[in-house]
Image: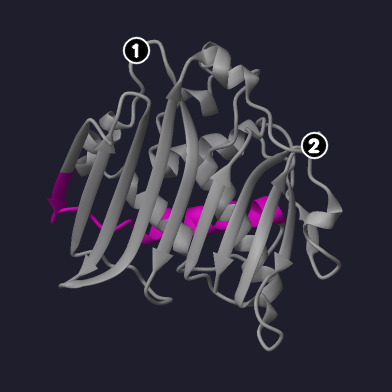
Amino acid sequence: MPDVSLQEAFTDVPKTSAKALSEFHSLVAGAIGVRARSNTVTQSALMLGAPELASVRDRMQPPSGLSTVHETQRFWREYDGDMNVDRLSVSCDLATASARFQFGCFQGEALTGEIETRLRFVAPQQVAALKGAVFAPRMVGEAAIDTKTHRISSELVQAYVRLAHDDNPIHTDQAAARAAGLSSTVVPGMLLCALVEAAFSNYSNQSLGELKTRFMAGVPVGEAVRLVIAPRGSSNAPWSKARAFCVTRSGTIAAISDLNA
């Protein structure tokens, strides 16, 4: 049971600018070397950086002496199109060692999108002990696509966190990352989600309606990420569903995503 449950509604969240969206899509596409797409399900992450949501982001900060582990992330939308938000509902379940945030995107009275973030708060030494499983080809089968991003440089990460207003220093500051129990700065989980979506859409030529990701290990900034995506749909529509593995240079599974077109 959460220690505290809070609900808020925001009617003055500004629309993400066309310039910011264009920069975001170009950044993500450039990291993989594919054509940039618009109206992606993961672009809604930029909305969470709005100044009006500063109080919500403050609740994502860990208690003193603890570090934040991004456990899961979910993006969902009702249809493929411009997600204009008239009203944003926010539900927060806060406990000593965890937090869950659910954002509901409304156009009028209709719920058109959701974002859910789950966090865990642990001691830095526990972060250092986290080890993802080793990826094996048997996890995906012969129909999987196997591709790789370009090296995710510190400049690329800095450009992303600027667009997303992600102020977590573990992505850009080596000292902060080490203090949190990490060996180096790590790629933001939201950016990994966007890279998975871009790779899937480029190969399948389909838009995503839902992306659910479980994070297992960090991806060090400066590395390329291997993306292995396997179809999981029916024989008539094999790419209507898929599972994606983000794999680090060492072969560790950093994240597993389930995708629904």
Question: Which residue carries the number 2 mark?
Answer: 249
**Rendered position, 175 above or below 88:** above
Residue 44 screen position, x and y as percent: 39, 57
Total labels drawn: 2
Residue 261 screen position, x and y as percent: 54, 74
Residue 46 screen position, x and y as percent: 39, 50
Disc on res. 64: 1
Q: Residue at x 39, y 75 (%)?
A: 81
**Rendered position, 64 above or below 9:** above
From which residue to which does the magenta span run? Answer: 7-32
Q: Residue at x 85, y 54 (%)?
A: 137
**Rendered position, 196 above or below 162:** below
Residue 127 is at least partly visible in this image: yes
Q: Nearer the viewer, residue 126 or 223?
A: 126
Which element type, helix, strand or loop, lies under badge 1? loop
Q: Nearer the viewer, residue 118 or 198?
A: 118
